[in-house]
Amino acid sequence: MPCSLFRGMEHRIFLSLGSNQGNRRELLEQAIGCLSRDVGQIIQTSSMIETEPWGFVSSSLFLNAVVELETELSPTELLDRTQQLERELGRREKSHNGAYQDRPIDIDILLYDDLVLHSDRLTLPHPQMHKRRFVLEPLSQIAPEQIHPILRCTATELLAEVS
C-alpha cells in the first residue's frame, strides 16, 4: 500500500498498551509520551486497568490502557514506529516460538480510521481485539460508540459479549 495515499491526512487511530514487567505504570506513561512525540497528537487516553495475562500463564499481572491519536503516518509507518518504541522501552521479541510471554511493553494497533487491511505484516482492525476484555474495557471508556469496521458493533456492544 503506497504511503502517498495517507500523506497529508490526519488519521484517527486507537492503540492498545500493555505492560507486565518492571514499573508498569511508568512504562505505559513513557510509551504515551513517546507516542505523542513520534506518532501524532493524543486525543484521549483511558485509565489504566490491571488484568490477568491473556493467551499465556504468568504470575505477573498486566497494566493496560488504550490511546486515541491523530496521525499522518501510513499504517505500515505506524507499525514500524510502534515497534521501534517497544524496542526503545525494553521489548526484545514479540513472542517466543509463536507463544505470548511477559513483556515490559506491548503496543498494538487496534483501529486505523475504518480501514480493513490484511497484509503479511499487519491486519486491521486488530484480529483479536473483539475477544479481549483488556482492550474493549478501556476502548469503551474513551470511545464507547466506536464501530468495529468488520463486525459493525460498537466497542460497548463488543465488551458486553466478552466473558
Image (cartoon, helix red, strand yellow):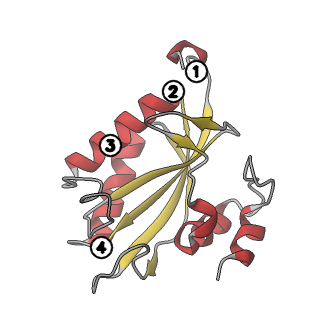
In the image, 159: left or right of 49? right
Give the amino acid at mark 1: Phe
The residue under label 1 is 6
Quarter of the image where one finds residue 5: top right
Residue that lies at the very extreme toward the right in this rendered image? 152
Give the amino acid at mark 3: Gln
Q: Point out residue 156 in the picture as x, y percentages from the top left corner.
A: 74, 69
Residues tagged 2 and 1 counted as in contact (Cβ below 8 A): yes
Q: Is residue 19 above or below residue 12?
A: below
Q: Distance between the Cα atoms at labels 4 and 2? A: 29 Å
Q: Secondary structure at mark 2?
A: loop
* Precedes in sequence: disc 1 or disc 3: 1
Q: Point out residue 127 in the picture as x, y percentages from the top left corner.
A: 57, 53
Q: Is residue 76 above or below residue 8?
A: below
In the image, 37: left or right of 76? left
Q: Point out residue 8 in the picture as x, y percentages from the top left corner.
A: 58, 17
Which disc is residue 74 wearing?
2
Give the amino acid at mark 2: Ser
Given residues 30 and 122, the one toward you in this image is 122
Quarter of the image where one finds residue 136: bottom right
Is disc 4 surrounded by few (<14), some (14 to 19) or many (20+) residues within 10 Å?
many
Q: Point out residue 13 in the picture as x, y percentages from the top left corner.
A: 58, 43
Q: Secondary structure at mark 1?
A: loop
* Precedes in sequence: disc 4 or disc 1: 1
Which disc is residue 83 wearing?
3
Q: Is residue 20 above or below residue 60?
A: above
Residues tagged 2 and 3 counted as in contact (Cβ below 8 A): no
Quarter of the image where one finds residue 140: bottom right
The residue under label 4 is 20
